[in-house]
Image: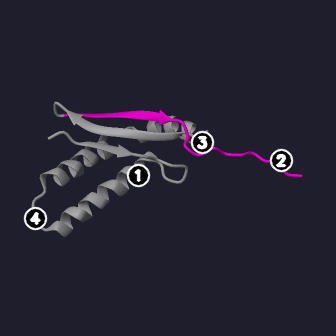
Amino acid sequence: MAIRIVLTPTVSHCIETVAKREYWKNVNNYLKKREEDKRLEGKIELLRSFLETADFANLRRKSEEHILHGKQVKFIVSIKNKKLLYEMIVEKSKQKINKKKIL
């Protein structure tokens, strides 16, 4: 079962915070189900591995530079051949900012 999670940091929430929130959201959903859910277990394990091994200072530095320039950043986290993989994708902002001269 291939599991892939997309995490989108913002100006107010760094990649580590977004990953932690996603982790706890999945844990809470799993506990509410009260039954086995392999897909949810896989997501929790993937996020746990990411939180334990990622260099968040480096990821924050790289992503915040783009976010502060109005670009959307996404991290794709997955496992392939039992190896944790993650990549950062930078997209152009969907929202255009109109600058107005203030007199």
Determine whether the residue tagged by mark 2 lies in a helix, strand or loop.
Answer: loop
Residue 13 in magenta stretch: no
Q: Mark 3 points at which residue?
A: 68
Nearest to viewer (mark 2 / mark 1):
2
Q: Mark 2 points at which residue?
A: 101
- Residue at x 55% of width, y 41% of height: 93
Q: Name the residue under label 4.
A: 35
Amino acid type at image mark 2: Lys
Q: What stretch is highlighted in magenta?
A: 83-103
Q: Distance from label 2 to label 1 (Cα)?
A: 35 Å
The residue carrying pointer 1 sits among few (fewer than 14), some (14 to 19) or many (20 or more) residues within 10 Å by Cα, namely some
Q: Distance from label 3 to label 1 (Cα)?
A: 17 Å
Nearest to viewer (mark 4 / mark 2):
2
Residue 89 in magenta stretch: yes
Q: Distance from label 3 to label 2 (Cα)?
A: 21 Å
Q: In which quarter of the image is residue 55?
A: top left
Q: Name the residue under label 1.
A: 18
The residue carrying pointer 2 sits among few (fewer than 14), some (14 to 19) or many (20 or more) residues within 10 Å by Cα, namely few
| 94 sits to left or right of 16 | right
Amino acid type at image mark 3: Leu
